[in-house]
Image (tube, grey):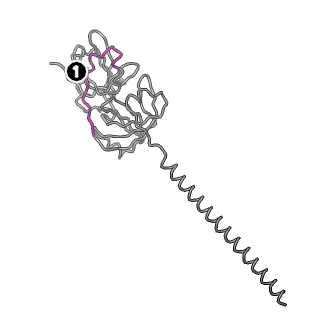
Amino acid sequence: MKKFLSLILALLMCVFAFVACVADVDVDENASDANLEADEVEEGEADVEAEPEEKVMTHAEYVAAALDDDVVVDAYVQGKQSWWDNKATVYLQDEEGAYFAYEMACSEEDYALLEKGTHIKVKGYKAEWSGEVEIVDATFEIIEGNFVAEAVDATAWLGTDELIKHQNELVSFKGMTVENISFKNDQPGDDIYVTLSKDGVNYEFCVEFYLTGTETEVYQTVSALEQGDVVDVEGFLYWYEGPNTHITSIAVAE
């Protein structure tokens, strides 16, 4: 009988020991799983933190970028050409150079905030149309800062390779002679095509209706110009099969 009880006790001890081992294994496995999940979370967080910030280009980097490349620039609004269907077309400039954002995604409310000098960050693609380099399919955000450019005298660059380096900048041309004035669709109320000459060479300019409107001083002054008038003009150095400055200001010589 004693031998029998001893055998029973020995068997029970073995069972208890086996259960304890299994429990220890489960605890270790659960701890390992928890540690693995924690490691995965930390790695995931590290991956998120490791995402590089979008690099804002210098003007030189923008110029060097290939057509259709992604571009990110920050610059300051110098002129608003148009808004329609939640798209804005604006001239931008900083201390290094200028940009033209064509049909940038923009609500009407945000368009009203884009006052002259407003600092914005623009993301889009570099494109070209008839010589005009522009940013398309763009989005933007307003950021801190303000800058208004002064017009650069570009008269001496007419007919040289230097001129195109200043595409879309606010520039001036002085002592230009009026050769021809014509209205788009042959009537006032739309764009005005202006041919001005310097030293016997003709250059094309334009009063862009969407940029200036028809009731402005510049539109009214250009409408009344006559062949032979001598003028000083300011405008954005747009490009269409060659320089085609969009005039924003004009003064007629006495």
Q: Which residues are magenta?
A: 146-163
From the viewer's side, name the closer residue of 98 and 85. 98
**Farthest residue toward the left?**
254
Quadrant where the N terminus sits is: bottom right
Residue that label 1 marks: 232
| Residue drawn at x 32%, y 32% as measured from the top left | 93
Q: Give the number of marks.
A: 1
| Mark 1 surroundings: few (<14), some (14-19) or many (≥20) residues within 10 A | some
| Residue drawn at x 27%, y 40% as measured from the top left | 146
Q: Position of residue 36 (x, y in %)?
A: 60, 58
At label 1, which amino acid type do we have? Asp
Q: Quadrant of residue 37?
A: bottom right
Q: Is residue 153 above or below residue 119?
A: above
Q: Secondary structure at mark 1?
A: strand
| Residue drawn at x 31%, y 44% as measured from the top left | 144
Q: Position of residue 17 (x, y in %)?
A: 72, 75
| Residue drawn at x 30%, y 20% as measured from the top left | 194
Q: Quadrant of residue 8?
A: bottom right
Q: Is residue 30 above or below residue 176?
A: below
Q: Position of residue 168 (x, y in %)?
A: 34, 27
Question: What type of secondary structure mainly makes up the magenta span?
Answer: loop
From the viewer's side, name the closer residue of 242 and 182. 242
**Farthest residue toward the top?**
200
Quadrant where the C terminus sits is: top left
Q: Quadrant of residue 72?
A: top left
Question: In the image, is 21 to the left or to the right of 47?
Answer: right
Q: Is residue 149 magenta?
A: yes
**Farthest residue toward the front?**
3
From the viewer's side, name the closer residue of 63 and 27. 27
Q: Is residue 23 magenta?
A: no
Question: In the image, is 68 to the left or to the right of 84?
Answer: right
Q: Position of residue 184 (x, y in %)?
A: 35, 24
